[in-house]
Image (cartoon, rainbow, N blue to C red):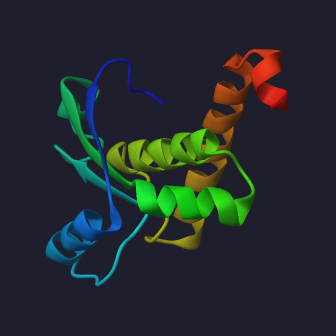
Amino acid sequence: MDCNEGEVSILFTDDKQISQLNKRYRGKDGPTNVLAFPMSDPGSPETNWGMLGDIVISLDRAVQESKDLGESLEETLYRLLIHGLLHLLGFDHVRSSEEERRMNEEETRLLRLIDMEKPNSQKEG
């Protein structure tokens, strides 16, 4: 991903707080599952060093998504963390359908890497 070092701040919160952040920073009403706040412009030299940014995840949304999608809460949290991290690194699924495809492919690739790292006993259960 061309990012060998970097620090990320992660905040797990509830729907109420993420709704406030969503309204304040994106002008959108209501909760969302994940927000990402980059500390520098993606692609700038600072992206490869120091603080990449903040990722905020609503645990309320994560629990509901895990139920809706039939995946474990752990899998949902990994997916949301990766999604937020990709935003910090400059991926943007809203910009265009091509960007959405690229982001989805990278998200899938990284999720597969995490799955490969799990011991067999955790994969099945």
Q: Residue at x 75, y 56 (%)?
A: 70
Residue 63 is left or right of residue 67, and the answer is: left
Tag count in the figure? Answer: 0
Residue 116 is left or right of residue 107, and the answer is: right
- Tell me if residue 29 can be seen: yes
Q: Residue at x 27, y 72 (%)?
A: 19
Q: Position of residue 31 (x, y in %)?
A: 36, 73
Residue 54 is left or right of residue 124, and the answer is: left
Front residue of 61 and 10: 61
Q: Position of residue 2 (x, y in %)?
A: 43, 27
Quarter of the image containing the C terminus?
A: top right
State the image quarter where residue 66 is shown: bottom right
State the image quarter where residue 110 is shown: top right
Q: Residue at x 40, y 69 (%)?
A: 32
Q: Position of residue 34 (x, y in %)?
A: 39, 58
Q: Considering only vertical position in the picture, is 85 above or below 37?
A: above
- Tell me if residue 92 can be seen: no
Q: Position of residue 76 (x, y in %)?
A: 59, 48
Q: Considering only vertical position in the picture, is 121 above or below 80?
A: above
Q: Considering only vertical position in the picture, is 17 above or below 29?
A: above
Most extreme residue toward the bottom, as rendered?
29
